[in-house]
Amino acid sequence: MAGYGNKKNFVVSEQEIAHLDAMLKNIDSDISVAMSYVRRTQKLTFKELEKKFSGINGNTLKRYMQQSYQSMRPIHIVAAYSWVTMVPMTAFYYGFKIKEFYRGMDDNAVEALICLGRLPAEMLNQFLNMVCCMLDDQSKQEFLEFRQQIESEYGVIEDHREFLPPDTLDIKEFAIDYYRSVAVTARQFREEHNISVEMASRLIGLSEYQYHVLEDINKPVPLPVSIGFRVKLGFKLNSHANFTSAMTVFPEFHKLRQVQHVRDSLLVEALRRLKSHERGPMTKVLISLSELYK
């Protein structure tokens, strides 16, 4: 958890907690919209989706994607769904505004980016080189500087085939591994920053009892999807990916989240530097490539 920095005696105001409550009051509905949008964009049927999981049926997945569904959507379900669809988990928090995650992109470019999770690193690099050839000298230099900066911080684009999900993901086994990692890393984070259980529980919207359960590695229970975004916003973190760093059964999931950040950042930065009349044809290239790796 060293990457979080040293923020001793962290304090969150009542106004900040109230702001989080208001901002995320419709988070379950927003998540359902984003999950449904990704499914349609990737042209996944519920039958196909059902085959990608064990331990959960297609009807349950369908209910999670319905705005009218009133029950909680557990965060491990959204995490597993993000892995199977290879779409960054953070994108699902945007709901109706999922396109804001890919700021500056038109609808076609967003759809292409959502479908490119399985594109091999070599092909992605070739595409980025093609874009660079179309840029003027200044834009090209700025993009290369951006690439150098992000890769120095998060690592270079890797061939992420080893980080792909299993052909069939056991959702129950994934949930246990996910919540155990959250328990270990949440306690470490709280102790490093001298955050009381009372403060932590109020910030992420749980009772103190529920928060103690969250930190209990021997009692993994489903938690609301809102806790991920509340932690990220409330503690002003650049990412909440470190909370999956202690996964031992599915360590590939954590590594993929880092790889996804690099891939998406570079693609968006490259595409946004193209002229509008160039971006359309290049987006078509991306969509064609995505069809090869479903």
Image (cartoon, rainbow, N blue to C red):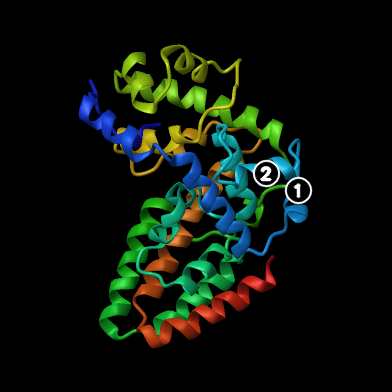
Q: Which mark is residue 232?
A: none
| Distance between the alpha carbons at the discs numbered 1 and 2 | 8 Å
Q: Which is more toward the observer, 41 or 71?
A: 71
Q: Is residue 91 left or right of residue 164?
A: left
Q: Please provide percent x and percent y for residue 182.
A: 51, 28
Res. 50 mark: 1
| Tag 1 secondary structure | helix
Is 84 above or below relative to 292? above
Residue at image point 58% right, 35% down: 76
**Residue at horizontal 44%, vertical 32%?**
227
Q: Are marks 1 and 2 in contact (CB under 8 Å)?
A: yes
| Quadrant in the rendering for residue 56 | top right
SS at mark 2? helix
Left or right: 123 in relation to 138: right
Tell how many labels: 2
Q: Is residue 143 left or right of residue 31?
A: left
Camera-side mark, 1 or 2: 2
- In which quadrant of the rendered image does the N terminus lie? top left
Give the residue at mark 2. Answer: 61
Q: Amino acid at mark 1?
A: Glu
**Mark before the other along the chain sequence, 1 or 2:** 1
What is the residue that sits farthest to the front in this orientation? 68
**Percent of width and height locating residue 29:** 49, 43
Specify the amino acid type for callout 2: Leu
Please report the residue visible at 62 percent of the width from the left and 71 percent of the height from the top. Answer: 290
Q: Which residue lies at the image location 37% right of the left edge and 81% below the top edge?
A: 274
